[in-house]
Amino acid sequence: MEEFDVVIVGGGLSGLFCAHRLAGAGMKILLIERGEYCGSKNLTGGRLYFGPIKELLADMWHELPIERKVIRERLSVVASHGSLTFDFFHERFRESHSFTLLRAKFDKWLAERVSKRGVMMLTGYRVDDLLVKDGQVKGVMVQGEAVGANVVIAADGALSFLSEKASLRARRPEAFAVGIKEVIELDEGKIEDRFGVERGEGVAHLFFGQPTGGVFGGAFLYTNSSTISLGLVLGIGSLIRNGKSRVSELLEVFKERYEVRRFIEGGRTVEYSAHLIPELGLAPTSRLVGNGIMLVGDAAGFALNMGFTVRGMEFAIASGILAAETAKEAKKRGDFSERTLSGYERRLRESFVLEDMGRFSKIPFILQDEALYSLWPYRFIDFLHDLYSFDRMPKERMGRAFWKLLRGSVLNLWGIRKVLQLKDV
């Protein structure tokens, strides 16, 4: 049986950044990725906030293969017959606010860099089980072959098999969402003209309401260098309750909307993918470390839906780096027990990761209320339609129209409950 100091299972952001930080530390590292290459199964096209992780990346962030710098934030409230879009720009966004990226390209680049730094990469292989001896994880089984390790880093995604095997997290259908996405190829100049941005600049646009068909979730559109990423994220529990199974049809309807089709007209779909996403963060019973094992990224549940934006990639990067620092400390001590590896949780608490995950933990549960998608957007859009419409009939007083909106959406038991829920957010 070949022995390693650290075996990392999963070649996504958390696993690769963990490997990158461990490289050069005098440790024998193996990264196992079940895809043909790192990035072959990581098809996210989204945005990465740089502020929280800039110090962790040091000078490396200047070299990252990003797509566009996000300088405009858009949020649309959408009903079947109309919409309202908030469009926010700030000069400071031109500094290093956030960037769009394509994970297939990004992860492949990072894997090549990690490999050059001496990390052994094993791609196209699936991990079948953990090796456990006397309550201590001692490695993994890879297609019938034992691979020994002092520490196993579980970076195997939202449906982490390893976290379940180690009894650290349990799968709950309501804790996951399914994301479906298309990447549409379009000339760089057309993207800049249509979105009103300059070269290298881009837009992040979220849609709330009708696109999900009354299901908990939302739609998104991100501008890349010469492509547009757009799609839907839908809560699995809500899909089941509403009996909706053909989510691809919702995406087609979304693409045909006036607010979307003018941006993608003439484009060519070059990629279509689906992906499971952790939606509700950390469960109260979840643990992040055990004897000889640590959970990072999606496997740990590190994703945060804040309503006006969705975060995950910076959590994945930070958790991978902090797990690497903990593994180095454990190697120095010669102790890979849960007690020593709990230093990982301490590092997470001292960072933005658990601070933000805890501070905004109630938001995903508030957003699960399906009335927010099936009722409230329609009432709000109807109110705006009445406000801006004039015909031969006398115009209703604005105060009365506004009162009707409040009475139908906020000044009732549902609205009061929502306001009370928001007070601690």
Image: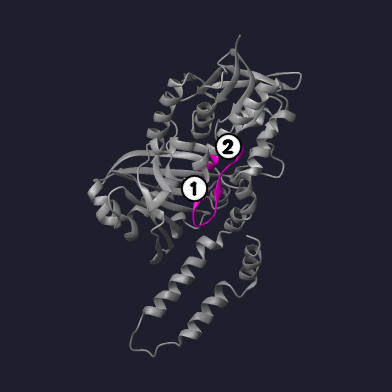
Callout 2: SS: helix
Residue type (three-letter) at the residue carrying disc 2: Ser
Looking at the rendered image, the quarter that the C terminus falls into is bottom right
> In x, y percent, where is residue 57?
49, 37
Q: Give the range drawn in magenta.
A: 297-316
Q: Quick one: label 2, few (<14), some, or many (20+) residues within 10 Å? A: many
Tell me if residue 204 can be seen. Answer: no
Residue holding disc 2: 319
99 left or right of 331? left
Instruction: Please report the residue visible at 46 percent of the width from the left and 25 percent of the height from the top.
Output: 114
Instruction: Please report the residue visible at 66 percent of the width from the left and 66 percent of the height from the top.
Output: 420
Looking at the rendered image, the quarter that the N terminus falls into is top right
Task: Pick out the residue farthest to the top.
Answer: 1
270 left or right of 379? left
Callout 1: SS: helix
Q: Quadrant of residue 67?
A: top left
Instruction: Please report the residue visible at 39 percent of the width from the left and 35 percent of the height from the top.
Output: 63
Circle count = 2
299 is within the stretch colored magenta: yes
Residue holding disc 1: 51
The mark found on residue 202 in the picture is: none
> In x, y percent, where is residue 412?
62, 74
Instruction: Please report the residue visible at 56 percent of the width from the left and 25 percent of the height from the top.
Output: 8
Q: Answer with mark 2 or mark 1, whichever residue precedes in sequence.
A: 1
